[in-house]
Image (cartoon, helix red, strand yellow):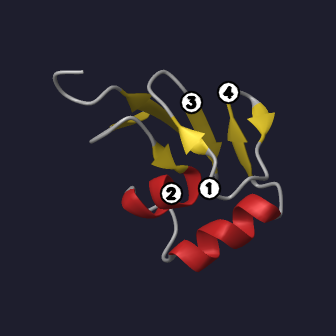
Amino acid sequence: MLELQLRGEYIELDKLLKALGLVESGGRARMLIAAGEVKVDGQVELRKTAKMRAGQVVEFAGQQVRVLAAAGG
C-alpha cells in the first residue's frame, strides 16, 4: 500500500492521483474519477475535487493509497 502524507488538512482527489504519479495529468485524473474508476474507503467516488483527509484509503488501478496526517498535525 502506498502512503501520502498531507501538507495541510486535505488534498483534492484529482491532485492526489497526479501527485503520486498514478496518472500523467490532472485532466486524466478527472476523467477517470468521473468514469467511476476511483474508490475512496471502498465506495466509488465521482467528485473530482473531493477532499481526502488523514485516514482515508483511495483505490485506483489495483493500487491502494493511505492518506496520512501532516507532520506535526
Badges 4 and 3: C-beta atoms under 8 Å apart?
A: yes
Q: Could you tell me which secondary element the residue under label 2 belongs to?
A: helix
Label drawn at residue 41:
4
Is residue 16 visible to the viewer in this orientation of the structure?
yes
Which sits earlier in the primary sequence, circle 3 or circle 2? 2
Which label lies toward us, 1 or 4?
A: 1
Q: CA distance from mark 1 to mark 2?
A: 11 Å
Which sits earlier in the primary sequence, circle 1 or circle 4? 4
Which sits earlier in the primary sequence, circle 4 or circle 2? 2
Q: CA distance from mark 1 to mark 4?
A: 16 Å
Badges 1 and 4: C-beta atoms under 8 Å apart?
A: no
Residue to which mark 1 is pinned: 49
Name the quarter where the N terminus is drawn: top left
Tell me if 64 is positioned left or right of 73 in this view.
right
Q: CA distance from mark 3 to mark 1?
A: 15 Å
Residue to which mark 2 is pinned: 17
Q: Give neighbour class at mark 3: few <14, some 14-19, many 20+ (Cα, 10 Å).
A: some
Q: Give neighbour class at mark 2: few <14, some 14-19, many 20+ (Cα, 10 Å).
A: many
Q: CA distance from mark 4 to mark 3?
A: 5 Å
Is residue 62 visible to the viewer in this orientation of the structure?
no
Badges 3 and 1: C-beta atoms under 8 Å apart?
A: no
What residue is shown at x 50% (from left), y 77% (from top)? 25
Quadrant of res 70: top left
Residue to which mark 3 is pinned: 57
